[in-house]
Image (cartoon, coloured by chain):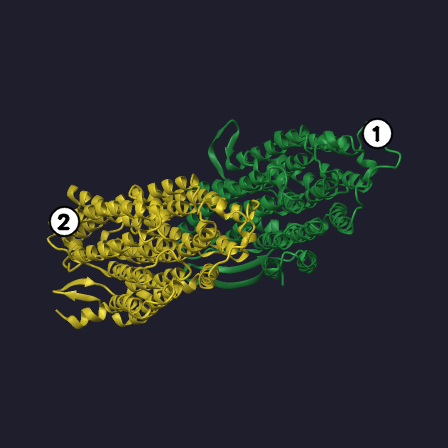
Chain colours: A green, B yellow
Amino acid sequence: MLAWTIYLSFAGAALEALLPEARARLARWLALSCAVVGLVIAGVDFFTHMGAARTVLVDLPWVPAMGIRFQLAADGISRVLVLLTGLASVSGVLFSWNIEKRTGQFFAFYLALIGGVYGVFLSYDLFLLFVFYEIAIVPKYFLIAIWGSTRREYGAMKLALYSFVGSAMVLIGLLASYAASGSHSTTLIDLAHANLPVSSQMALFPLVFVGFGILAGMWPFHTWAPTGHVAAPTAASMLLAGVVMKLGAYGCLRVAMGLYPHGLDPWGFSVLGIGSWRDVFALLAVIGIVYGALVALVQTDFKFVIGYSSVSHMGFVLLGLMTLSQIGLDGAVLQMFSHGIIAGLLFAIVGRIVYERTHTRQLAELETMHLARRLPFAAWAFVLAGMASMGLPGFSGFVAELQVVVGSWTLNPVWTIATAIGIVIGVAYTWRALQRAFFADKQPTAEDHPKEGWQSMGAITWPEYTGVGLLMGASLVVGLYPRILLDSIEPAVKALLAGGIQ
Amino acid sequence: MNLADLFRVTLPETALEIAALVVLIADLGLLRKATLSTRVAAAALLGVLGTVVALCLLPCAGSTGYSYGGELLLSSGGFTAVAEAGILLLTLLTLLLFIGTSFTRHAAEYVAVILMAAAGGLIVASAQDLLIIFVGLELLSLGLYVLTAFNKHSEKSSESALKYYLFGGMSAAFLLFGFSYLYGMSGTTSLYWIQYNIGEMGPTPLLYVAWVLIVAGLGFKIAAFPFHLWAPDAYEGAPAPAAAFIASVSKIASFGLLLTFSMNLLAPGGPISGSSSVVEPYLKNEYLTWQSLAGVLLVVAAASMIVGNLAALAQTSVRRLLAYSAIAHAGYMLLGIGTHAQYSGQASPFHFLLGNIGAAVNSADAVLYYVLTYGLTTIGAFGVVQVVETATGSDKLDAFLGLHKRNPLLAAVLLILFLSLAGIPPLVGFWAKFNLFAAVLAVGAGPVPFALVALAVAMSAVSLFYYLQVLKRAYVLPAADESPIKAHPVTMLVLVVIAAAVVVSGCLPTILQNWIVQGHV
């Protein structure tokens, strides 16, 4: 059943592409129904398979001569991320309700991207996974370049090229492991069983990890992320931060760590305390956490703040992966979910609710607009979302980041401390953005506050309420009752740690 | 001499030549008073009919080929049949693209030259003897020069044809000179015996000279660096359907020829027998002979990938962009041929050769797959350029501005074809690349093939940039002129069929692959 999320999205994309340009209303409802059905399928499957082991959904020979199979399967990690994709796609459609320009095409690219994302999370054949991974690249480019804002062509091209370079690295890894395993099969399980020599695992692991890591916003390959997020239309930023960055992290976990477990072994020598790829990538993750937070602290553009905060939060995911411990990996997967929800929410508030009404994202200009009085809903939604993003207890981010931090202690306490500093800076930049954008000190002057009242900014529409409610609810539910996800994540992580993918 | 055999093997060529004559007679005799568009349509349809007949006659050629005096002169069946079928199919498509055009009043002559050039292509793909190879190449090339110059109203067309002709003449001289060295060393013009006789001697410095000269001659045909200089001009100046023909059909024929060379050099044995102490040194020599050619090919392959992709970045004309991308694609394919076999020196040469024949056949399949699908995609790309050019009078990048508004279907076709050329799944271009690179790595996992594949993959990441430059104009940037672009219905149909084929064979790659593999089983 879960496989239908993929087919449905692509079918929806094809239909949207065929719609005449004038049928904007139909295009919206069609996209919403595709996304909702996808979410329902993902949700039903998630709740009926809680804690279940890996189940194979589809397994057909695709290219028998080369051992390539159309194999879709889901374990706890996949199910959590598919659920996230469902939530992100529904809320993304809701926050794109006001797209008037080439609406059908917009949703065609949007649904094609969603289909690719579902496909990556469900593929158990490396070739198939790679195909879906690349399918997701092209729609991103067009979504940003056509419907984006600030420097959209630059941001879109940068994003497309970074993604494509990353996927080229993955492709080299795929070809090399396929050849090294005797060119019999490309399924993840067969490749993991192929017992590649330790030396080639050592060489392929960093290649593939960095290849996927580029899309996960790994420092210093993160520079596509802020520009891309800022340039993208709201729904695309939500998807980029919400699910596309997770594609990268998921690839790091499932492919790089699953296929080349010995790539994480110590080198046998150490330079400045760095003695394995594990240390290298953990260090990059910690740098990403602190660097992203510091840069977010000095941004003047509201959306850039969120963009850099994504880099910082994705650092937690990568750090969690590198702990190689149950608690750290649990935290990493949970953080993928949590960041997907929260970043989506923040981008929706900044890009849709605020920007579409004020037409500026400069904090200095927003300061003069007294948004707390004029858009109270946006202000309070951002307060809650900001609290979630800071990692306050009660929201999903707290559970996830706590687990990662605890897990990282076994790796290296110094990094735990650095990470904690990153969290503190995270509070600072969120607070700063919140205050400057919504609760500025400046009292409204007479001109600011004309007698007849402020010019209306337009009421908050139902799609906005629904979208905010959906994402906020998800973050709260997971924050208050994290077992709902952990019950699925834990067995899958345990199996992964016990024997790679085997 | 068995003339019946010769006639049987050359039936498709004969059909094409007869069709060429019929087209001329019909046009000069029956259609003298007809309008130009009728004459163009009639000539193209007759040409299509001729290629269909030739396609149907292809299986009649059997699989034994034509030999004379114990020497195989023309092969048939197997790889040859696949390449020939590809040549005929793509010729058919370029003829259909001709229907919508009006660049020449000499419709029948144009079609006749196309058909004769295609016959030359068939001969090149099947030839097993140096002299026949040369005759076939000349037949093909002369046709191409004429086709390039066919737009008499365009200075560019004449200029590029002259350039093409001068370069072509020089490269033919190189090729012939190289052939004469091969003949001098081996005393025969049959590829089979050349392989045997040279294998006995092992690689000599003179052999390297011969290979370099021959690669210079063939590198010109496939537009590989540094013999590529004609390509951007010819692609830019030639009438669009003729450019499509040059970019696709002549590519298939030339790669068919390269495969003939490499498969002949790799075939173990010849009439050797005896104890392993006699056979082994001989086989080792044979392998070294092959290696000497492969080394030259790989250098050219790497250079073509780099130069083609980097130069394409700077182009403002879509035709020139396609030309440089063709150079890059030729590099990928040469990689597939150059790494047919890698000898690690561990196993005994005999086992190595036997074991590697399978792998070599695989990579030959992959190269054929690549060149066929690449040819198909390129024809489509030139078809789109033709439509846009007819409407806007230019093939510059900016002529594509706002194409999605001016003709949504055409823009969709462009999107599919260019993404396929860039190697984005699930389109056929991706599958062709994956298949090719996997075959290269399956042959030998040494550092050289791996580095070359890594280079090729990295370069195809570069290529996305320039393909996106065109798509960006078609989809993203605002249109300067929003008047709709009309395309001839036949042209549109051909383009849609090509785009559909690109999608379908990308999603279900086994269809085409099985057809290619069954060709030689």
Residue A261 in view here: yes
Which percent across, then down, holds residue A36? 69, 58
Q: Is residue B223 above or below residue A16?
A: above
In what quadrant of the picture does the C terminus of chain B appear?
Answer: bottom left
Is disc 2 in contact with disc 1, using a CB cutoff of under 8 Å?
Answer: no
Could you classify mark 2 by the number of other residues whose Cα lies within 10 Å: few (under 14), some (14-19), or many (20 or more)? some
User: Which residue matches tag 1?
Assistant: A447
Q: Secondary structure at mark 2?
A: helix
Q: Chain of mark 1?
A: A
In what quadrant of the picture does the N terminus of chain B appear?
Answer: bottom left
Give the numbered dot on residue B180.
2
Residue A260 in view here: no
Which percent across, then down, holds residue A83? 67, 53
- Closest to the camera, between mark 2 and mark 1, is 1
Q: Amino acid at mark 1?
A: Glu
Q: In the figure, is residue B500 to the left or right of A288?
A: left
